Image (tube, helix red, strand yellow):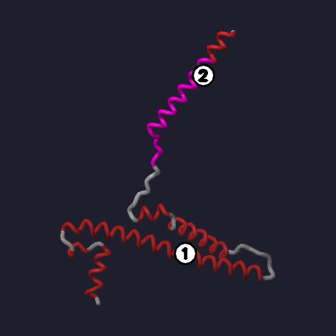
Amino acid sequence: MMKILLPLISFLLGTGKNFFKEPGVALTQQLVLHLRALTTMLVSTIVSLVLFCVGTSFLVSAVAKQLDSEESFVFSGGTILFTALTVISLAVLIYSLRRQTWLKTLGFEERPAPAKQSGALENAVALLVMDFVEERQNKRTQKSEQAS
């Protein structure tokens, strides 16, 4: 069993250089880096989801316990702690589920959408319209000067 696990563990830890020849080392290192980043994102997502569920359930039980008592509702240390746990784990969960985070983890960069470039025909029509507008403005100014 250890004969199977040892190469796998050394591969995941990045010490598996002796299993591959020189050209494969760079590919192996990139693969290991991406696997580590992907594993980190998956673990953080799962852990934050679990902590969110635990924090929410403890918060609900603490609030229900406060409401069932005959005393007035008071924010106790436990209620504040469970609220903080829920909010922090929700923030980590939202961050880890973003599209940009996963693209960055997998090594892809999201390129901004290219600006829409107008074609030659659109430019020609725009120039004709601007020329027409300028000609009309020149005629108006000449008429107003002649009338004055």
Q: Residue at x 71, y 73 (%)?
A: 75
The residue under the point 27% across, 70% down is 28
Up/down of 66 relative to 21, above or below: below
Q: Quadrant of the N terminus?
A: bottom left
Magenta span: chief secondary structure: helix
Q: Position of residue 80 (x, y in %)?
A: 66, 72
Is the residue 116 above or below the residue 131 in the image? below
Badge 1: residue crowd in 10 Å (few <14, some 14–19, many ≥20): some
Disc 2 element: helix
Crowd rating for badge 2 (residues with CA inside 10 Å; few <14, some 14–19, many 20+): few
Q: Which residue is mark 2?
A: 136
- Total tally of numbered discs in the picture: 2
Q: Tell me which corner region of the image, top left, top right, bottom left or bottom right, holds residue 134.
A: top right
Q: If the image is split into quadrants, where does the C terminus sit? A: top right
Determine the residue positioned at 71% across, 78% down. 63
Residue sitting at the far left = 21
Label 2 – label 1 distance at C-alpha: 67 Å
Q: Which marked residue is nearer to the observer: mark 2 or mark 1?
A: 2
Q: Amino acid at mark 2?
A: Arg
Q: Magenta residues?
A: 114-139
Asked where in the image residue 7 lies, by quadrant, the reply is: bottom left
The residue to which callout 1 is attached is: 49
Residue 101: x and y in percent read: 47, 63
Q: Nearer the viewer, residue 82 or 18?
A: 18
Q: Given the image, on which type of amino acid does mark 1 rest?
A: Leu
120 left or right of 141 in image: left
- Which numbered disc flags the more N-terminal residue, 2 or 1? 1
The relative height of residue 76 versus residue 111 in the rendered view (above or below) is: below
123 sits left or right of 37 in the view: right
Left/right placement of residue 69 relative to residue 118 reads: right
Is residue 79 within the magenta segment?
no
